[in-house]
Amino acid sequence: MEFTTKKTIKMAIVGGAVAATALLSACSGNSVAGNGSPVRNAAETAAVGQVPEGGGRGAATGGSGAAANGDVDCSKYGGPVGAPGRTKMDLIAVAATDGTKPGCTEAFTVIAEYYQKLPQAEGPGERVLDVQGKWTCARQAGSAGAKGAVVCGVPNSSLQLETRPSGEAPEGRGGKFPNSTQRVQFAGYDAGTRMVRFKLVTHQDSPVDGRTYRLPLQKGGEVFSAATLCPSDSVTIDDQGFGSRPCGQEQLIQQLKDGNPVLAQITVNGDDRIATVKEIYRP
């Protein structure tokens, strides 16, 4: 997109002892490219409260950053972001099925604080629990090393943002899983984003590609136990070997938190949310 209006704003970041210049667009659809550190530019963008049209809290739609699935590429307005020494990525305000999404100003503020708190992060996933008083951020499963893609969410909320390599759709989005049935082995649960992790498997229970994917559970979705999801004295399966005993999503989540690698068949709805989980019985 060509620039039609430009403003040059120079500001000092208190406590940072550094000054940087960021170009901020005053018109809808204009791109903004920072001149200094992407993290510093992100903090400046948030600090001045400059939000592109369609980039407001809970209403980040429209503009050149809007994707077909409703996500907003905030880096089209404020430039790429990344921790020092790592690949710079696009910052995405992720659209929930109810249309809720963070504004780009909030997204830049959150990711900048996350990078600042990395030295105090927890474990190999670099999880930070308290970002801006409510967000939880962590590196995505299977995203080690320089790639370092990050996902942030607000517990008990649909607000989510993430980073991704430029031009790349996140795992489990972009038309890969909607309206499909998959055979998977669950690998865990991300409480901050309320997503389950899993690997695709064949009918021989061998990994398809070795990658770990993430998807949210559909609210009110069905879960059926064969033997371990909801422990019972008897096995409850249908004629295809899938669990038939109704079980709750809370039980599934607890099993995943406890490290149980549940094998299951999942049905994914059109919004990339897992609507049905049927445990696959293994004698």
Image (spheres, helix red, strand yellow):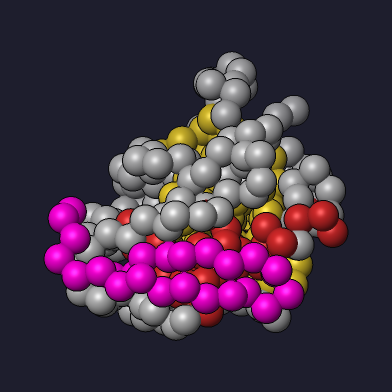
| Residue 200 rendering spot, x and y as whole percentages | 54, 30
Number of numbered labels in the structure image: 0
Please state, as top left, top right, bottom left or bottom right, where the N terminus lies in the image. Answer: bottom left
* Side of 89 where 50 appears, left or right: left
Q: Is residue 19 magenta?
A: yes
Q: Name the residue rendered at 67%, 58% in the picture.
A: 115
* Side of 77 where 257 appears, left or right: right
| Residue 219 rendering spot, x and y as whole percentages | 49, 69
- Compared with 245, 114 (above or below) is below
172 or 92: nearer the eye?
92
- Picture quadrant of residue 223: bottom right
- Picture quadrant of residue 116: bottom right
- Compared with 184, 210 (above or below) is above
Q: Is residue 277 visible?
A: no
255 or 240: nearer the eye?
255
Q: Is residue 66 visible?
A: yes
| Residue 17 rendering spot, x and y as whole percentages | 70, 69
Please state, as top left, top right, bottom left or bottom right, where the C terminus lies in the image. Answer: top right
| Residue 90 rendering spot, x and y as whole percentages | 44, 50
Q: Name the residue rendered at 59%, 75% in the picture.
A: 12
Q: Is residue 265 magenta?
A: no
Q: Name the residue rendered at 44%, 82% in the picture.
A: 49
Q: Name the residue rendered at 63%, 34% in the picture.
A: 146
41 or 171: nearer the eye?
41
- Compared with 256, 31 (above or below) is below
Range shown magenta:
1-25
- Picture quadrant of residue 280: top right
162 or 96: nearer the eye?
162
